[in-house]
Each structure stands twice: as structure tokens, then as C-alpha cells.
Image (spheres, rainbow, N blue to C red):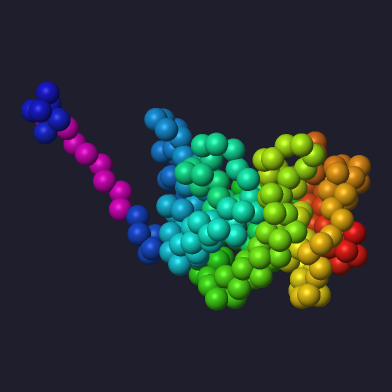
Amino acid sequence: MREGLLDRPVKVIVLNDKSDVQVRFDLFERLNTGGIRLTDQEVREAVFSGDFIDLLTELAETKLFDKTVNLQTGKHKDGTPQDFVLRFFAFYERYKDFDHSVKDFLNEFCASAADEPKLDERRMLFTDTFSFLSRVFPSGIHRGKRSITPVNVYEGVAVGAALALSVEPNLPTDQDLAWIDSEEFRELTTGATNDRKRVVGRIEFSRDRFLAGE
């Protein structure tokens, strides 16, 4: 068996930070078909590795994130926390440009952020927003009796809060959150939710509710 292995040719492809990003991504996608399949975020971490990806991990491991976002058991080590932090930044900065494909939207944002990490600016935005959210939602962002944080609800609430804070930094934290269970917000966060109208709708609906303090 050893001799058989030694006689086999081995093809090696070296990818580094000089390699074209799309080539790296396409290769990872092609190879990611057997064994334990990587999540989309795990592929991003490999392809776009650098300061911005490190920032996502840093923030995903903070007490503020852990207190604000309730994930399913087993989702803490597959890139899901980093994916949630990435969604916060991507939708905050570009939600009006979203066009149906979440995967492509996040990949394009990662590629841009890898070139321009804006570490201090984004770290401060995250800290300010999640400090507010952790006080408004002491049991984490959730809806109804379920304790898990639905990703679509999270997108609307987290980005909406950040936009509201950019208008009024001293928002009250003792807010009436009945709007999260309202029919209007449910329509924006259930069913076919990944279209521009609903993405913009749930983010701006949340922003306006926070600003209204109701």
C-alpha cells in the first residue's frame, strides 16, 4: 500500500493572497462536495482570510453577541456566529443594493471588506448597536415563545437598531417590543423573505419602530 501511494502522482494547487479571489472561491466550491461539507461562511473564511474575517470572529465571540443572539445547539462552531455578524455589516452598509441571492451578496461584501476592513469603524458600530440590543433584549432577540433568534428577524432588528442609533444615539432601552409579533413585521420576515422589497421593508420597519420608541 505504501509503495502504491509513493508511486501515485499528486497534483498540488497553491492559492495565496495573490491568487484571483474568484478563482479561489470557485475552487473551494468545486472541492466542497465530499466528506464534511463546509458551510458558506467556512468557505468565505478560507477564501477571504485576513483582518476583516478575523474581526468577524472577534465580535462573534463577545459577550454582547452571545447575550443578544440565541443560536441552535451545534451552530456555534460551523461559522454561523460569524455569518450573523457579517450579515449585520453587509445589510447595514448595502441593504438597498440587495438583489435576491444572500450568498452572492455576502460574498461580494466580504471581497470588498477584505480590501478595506475599516476595523475601528466597524468594531465601534457593532459595540454601540449590540450594547443597545443587549439591554433592549435581555433574553436575546426572539419572537413569541421560541428562544432561538430567527435570522430574518435578526437582520431587521439589528440593522434597524443601528440605523436608528445613527439618527438618535440616545434611544431609550425600555421600549414596547410588541411590534416584533405584529402581522406587518411577520409578513416581512416569513415566507419568501429574500427579495429586495422585504429586506428593505423589515430593516426600515424596525428602524422606524425603534425611533418611535414603540
Residue depicted at 49% across the width and 61% down the height: 58
Residue 150 pos. (x, y %): 70, 43
Is residue 12 in the magenta section? Answer: yes
Looking at the picture, tell me which residue is in the foreground, 79 or 29.
Answer: 79
In the picture, the quarter occupied by the C terminus is bottom right
In the picture, the quarter occupied by the N terminus is top left
Asked whether the viewer can see residue 141, the reply is yes
**Quadrant housing residue 132:** bottom right
The correct choice, above or below, for 130 with respect to 116 in the image is above
Residue depicted at 58% across the width and 53% down the height: 66
In the displayed image of the protein, which residue is found farthest to the top? 1
> How many numbered tags mark residues here?
0
Magenta: main secondary structure: loop
Is residue 130 in the magenta section? Answer: no
Asked whether the viewer can see residue 104, the reply is no
The correct choice, above or below, for 85 with respect to 70 in the image is below
**Left or right: where 48 falls relative to 187:** left
Residue 51 pos. (x, y %): 45, 67
Residue depicted at 46% across the width and 53% down the height: 45
Looking at the picture, tell me which residue is in the foreground, 122 or 161.
Answer: 161
**Left or right: where 190 falls relative to 65:** right
Residue 208 pos. (x, y %): 87, 62
Residue 29 pos. (x, y %): 47, 42
Looking at the picture, tell me which residue is in the foreground, 104 or 132.
Answer: 132
Residue depicted at 84% across the width and 53% down the height: 177
Which residue range is magenta in the image? 7-14
